[in-house]
């Protein structure tokens, strides 16, 4: 028996009638047409499908679309507020935090969750924070560098915004 | 994944009424991190899935005369980030943080962690809890048993109990409340787990129409606690063996001890032998070693898991030494 769901994705409301067994990642890609969220292992190991559910990083291959009913999702397409990249995206670009790019959307959204909770994580905290995301190309070092750089950028911009408000 | 009917009750009463009296008819969905995996692999195929996440009263952490009461739907992420959890129940807090990556901690619930099904690859491949060849031989004994039980393995069940948090909870004396059609009941967490003898039994004392609703950790007696995991890699992984220890001290000597091992038996394994080896002693390298020896004195490894005996011995020893050194010291709440 199908269910009606209403899911806000990157600020836009999506309504659809779905089978309860439809996974959130398939809803995002096939119903909403947002293919930036990648499907990797589909067993919640690799983290490629990470999105933000009400701001918290989750693996969208192990969430049903009906579990996200009434809630809000941020995918990689919705991370940057404007035409400019988000500071985490800039940092991944500048620090060579990606090679093939398959893990990148999940890495960036997982880093976003980490930096929301801990604005200046240590190297070990970054490594723990991205422990649920696999990358087969980079050897992780450039990803760790990118998250550090993103942290610096975000802290600087926050200080600049605070000064501007004074 | 097979099709199913999906319901989202908002009270525990409604939830219990929606659950059927047999396991194949209905399943409880909380965070879904285990259930969805089982359903994708067709290990379980419930006709109805009852999402209990909308039952508000089952969320959150409260402190009271009974100690800490945790709603079964509280996520591991909330517990990991809760300042009082780590302050008063440090070994439990360590176990929660170590249990899974951020994304899984955000979804997974404490109740779900307790009720998760075994990770045994024969079970996950659809061969059941007591897997057998067509001739009736144990698939585990005949096959790849490198991660299987070294204790409590006299019967047909040779998987290991899957939770890495439950042993620490047992060390703190946890109890759980269960809601069912006849009302609520409460059991010591230690007694909740049972070794199934046949395929018709489960690894826990939960009936198909019951839900774990609350977890109680008693006010921590001024004692010393530790949780020690042995894993194949540093990042998130199932432990090969773990030990959780609670020591009540009388000056420098151990007045009473609780030593709980994980991943060694089909249930969380409480070692009376190890506890007895510690009582009346001061904790030294030698007494901790002796307790480790005692913990595995009854071990009967299978063909490919003899290494786990040594890991268990060392995990118990190190957990005891860490507890004694006050790495994770519990204060009175």
Image: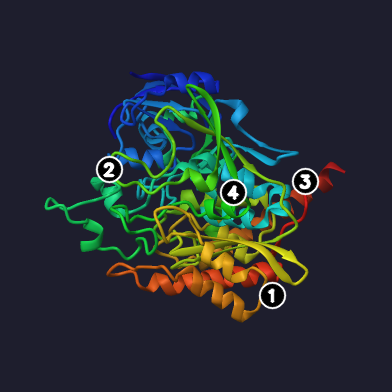
Mark nearer the viewer, 1 or 2: 1
- Disc 1 designates what residue? B282
Q: In the depicted view, which residue is nearer to us: A103 or A161?
A: A103
Q: CA distance from mark 4 to mark 3?
A: 19 Å
| Secondary element at tag 3 | helix
Q: Residue furthest bottom?
A: B286
Q: Where residue B129 appears, x then y in whole percent? A: 30, 47
User: Which residue is painted at 20% across and 52% down in the image?
Assistant: B132
Residue B34 located left or right of residue A153: left
Question: Is the C-beta separation of discs 3 and 2 under 8 Å?
Answer: no
User: Which residue is painted at 73% across and 48% down in the image?
Assistant: B84
| Secondary element at tag 1 | loop
Residues indicated by labels 1 and 4 sit on the same polypeptide chain? no
Mark drawn on residue B199: 2
Mark nearer the viewer, 3 or 2: 2
| Secondary element at tag 2 | loop
The quarter of the rendered structure image containing the N terminus of chain A is top left
Mark drawn on residue A112: 4
Q: Is residue A66 above or below residue B227?
A: above
User: Which residue is painted at 62% across and 49% down in the image?
Assistant: B173
- Label 4 resides on the chain identified as A
* Residue A10 visible in the snapshot: no
User: Which residue is painted at 57% across and 47% down in the image?
Assistant: A85
């Amino acid at each position: 028996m199908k269910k009606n769901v209403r899911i806000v994705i990157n600020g836009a409301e999506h309504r659809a009638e779905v089978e309860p067994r439809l996974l959130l990642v398939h809803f995002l890609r096939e119903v909403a047409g947002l293919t930036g969220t990648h499907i990797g292992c589909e067993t919640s190991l690799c983290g490629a499908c990470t999105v933000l559910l009400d701001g918290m990083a989750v693996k969208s291959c192990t969430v049903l679309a009906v579990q996200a009913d009434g809630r809000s999702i941020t995918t990689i397409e919705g991370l940057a507020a404007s035409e400019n990249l988000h500071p985490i995206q800039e940092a991944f670009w500048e620090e060579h935090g990606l090679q093939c790019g398959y893990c990148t959307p999940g890495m960036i959204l997982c880093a976003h969750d980490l930096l929301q909770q801990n604005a200046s994580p240590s190297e070990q905290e970054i490594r723990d924070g991205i422990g649920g995301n696999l990358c087969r190309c980079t050897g992780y070092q450039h990803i760790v560098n990118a998250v550090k750089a993103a942290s610096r950028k975000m802290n600087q911009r926050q200080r600049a915004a605070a000064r501007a408000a004074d | 994944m097979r099709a199913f009917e999906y319901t989202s009750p908002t009270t525990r009463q409604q939830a219990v009424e929606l659950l059927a009296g047999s396991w194949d008819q209905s399943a409880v969905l909380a965070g879904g991190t285990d259930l969805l995996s089982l359903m994708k692999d067709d290990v379980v195929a419930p006709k109805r899935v009852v999402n209990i996440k909308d039952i508000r009263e089952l969320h959150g952490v409260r402190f009271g005369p009974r100690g800490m009461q945790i709603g079964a739907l509280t996520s591991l992420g909330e517990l990991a980030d809760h300042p009082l959890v780590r302050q008063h129940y440090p070994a439990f807090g360590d176990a929660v943080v170590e249990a899974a990556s951020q994304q899984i901690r955000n979804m997974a619930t404490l109740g779900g962690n307790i009720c998760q099904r075994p990770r045994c690859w024969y079970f996950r491949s659809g061969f059941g809890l007591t897997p057998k060849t067509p001739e009736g031989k144990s698939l585990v004994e005949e096959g790849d048993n490198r991660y299987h039980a070294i204790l409590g393995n006299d019967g047909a069940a040779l998987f290991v109990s899957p939770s890495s948090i439950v042993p620490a909870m047992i060390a703190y004396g946890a109890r759980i409340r269960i809601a069912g059609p006849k009302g609520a009941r409460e059991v010591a967490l230690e007694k909740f787990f049972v070794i199934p003898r046949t395929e018709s039994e489960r690894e826990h004392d939960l009936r198909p129409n019951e839900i774990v609703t609350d977890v109680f950790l008693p006010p921590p007696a001024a004692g010393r606690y530790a949780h020690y995991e042995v894993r194949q890699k540093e990042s998130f992984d199932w432990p090969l063996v773990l030990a959780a220890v609670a020591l009540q001290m009388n000056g420098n000597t151990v007045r009473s001890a609780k030593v709980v091992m994980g991943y060694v038996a089909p249930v969380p394994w409480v070692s009376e032998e190890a506890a007895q080896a510690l009582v009346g002693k001061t904790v030294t390298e030698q007494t901790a070693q002796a307790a480790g020896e005692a913990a595995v004195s009854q071990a009967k490894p299978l063909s490919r898991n003899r290494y786990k005996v040594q890991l268990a011995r060392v995990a118990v020893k190190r957990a005891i030494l860490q507890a004694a050194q006050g790495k994770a010291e519990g204060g009175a709440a």
